[in-house]
Image (cartoon, helix red, strand yellow):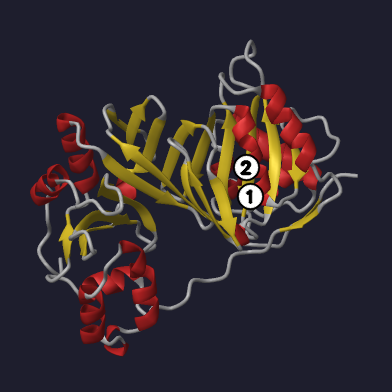
Amino acid sequence: MSAVLQTQARPVASTDAAAAPVDPASLRALFNAARSSGKRAKDAAESLGVSEGEAIAAHAGAHDHAMKAAPLQGPWVELLQALQLCGPLMALTRNASTVHEKTGVYENISATGHMGLALGDDIDLRLFLGRWHAGFAVSEPANDPKKPPAQSLQFFDKHGVAVHKVYVRQETDREAFDDIVGQFSAADLELVFTPAPLKDAIKPDTDIDAAGLVQGWSEMTDTHQFFGLISRFGAERQQAFRLVEGRFTERADPGIVRSLLDEAALDGTSIMVFVSSSGCIQIHSGPVKRIEPLVTASARWLNVLDPGFNLHLREDMIHDAWLVKKPTADGVVTSVEVFDGAGDLMAMFFGSRKPGVPEQQAWRDIAARLPRLQAGA
């Protein structure tokens, strides 16, 4: 018995389809046609008016299409811990605009309740496991018929949005990987995805205690206190930046990411790159070297193409950019944060540092040279 796919109607993401297919057979056929035309999985699903999770779930059970999906069950932290036996794997976390890929070993994984950590030398994750709704082992033919199928584990939230993916690499122990898939397989699992709700409205600035926010900001001793701070005052992230502008934040030119990557690559400064989904934050710590812009007919990509770390960021989607300073017990910590037109966080950049160690002067020097905008621009 295969996993049951239940979908609900939603707005169509593009004009490629007039309505969302609801039966798995139709969805499989349309999805594979969209993939064959060159669309990535996320884009192919959205062109049909369904989520990526729904499209993948439609490939569970017996059918004639080359892509296969086997439903998985948790506990997710135990599945991730088991992956250490596989050796090197590629971890992928993405949002609507940015893809973060790191190759390494899944190790030092722990969880307390729904909050988890992966603290390996290369795979560095913050896990919000309560938002992990579904998982699949996915097999898809490689572009080169001489190569084995691409194998991955793909995890989705309850709205069918990808929270994290794990890809087999050439160095991966495939026998160990297959054993883990078998151990966590759940062929009879029924999966239901629901449409995402509308985002909560942002409070008017006048409803926020701006003076209290500034005071609380000045009293931070750790960057991890920031989310609690803005939650306490009921402020949205960029709203908080506006309300402390000139004291702790500055508006930046949308080209700031290219500038900071170029500067870091030029002088070898070690940086941290954070990209988050709804259920995972993935972090790169180290230098960046090969910075490659790519312009296509529909997008302008900014890429980092280094051994072990790839970043793909839609530079044309940067709508707002900020330089942010947060006080800590180790001194001020400086970040660059960029947002898309919907107000969603695309990526954050810091200088590499360890707790108890002040921020690198090299990173501060880069930050001082980055292009600003006038306040209120």
Q: Nearer the viewer, residue 115 or 73?
A: 115
Quadrant housing the C terminus: bottom left
Answer whether residue 254 is visible to the viewer in this image.
yes
Q: Nearer the viewer, residue 147 or 327?
A: 327
Secondary structure beneath disc 2?
helix
Give the x, y percent position of residue 375: 12, 68
Type of residue at label 2?
Gln
User: Residue 322 falls in which quadrant of the image?
Assistant: bottom left
For the residues labelled 2 and 1, the Cα–Cα distance comes to 6 Å
Position of 237 relative to 142 (above/below):
below
Classed neighbour count for the residue bearing mark 1: other residues with Cα under 10 Å, few (<14), some (14–19), many (≥20) = some
Q: Is residue 343 left or right of residue 153?
A: left
Secondary structure beneath disc 1?
helix
Residue lying at 57% horizontally and 41% vertically, measured from the top left: 165
Residue lying at 30% horizontally and 64% vertically, measured from the top left: 222
Position of 26 relative to 309 (above/below):
below
Residue lying at 66% horizontally and 38% vertically, measured from the top left: 82
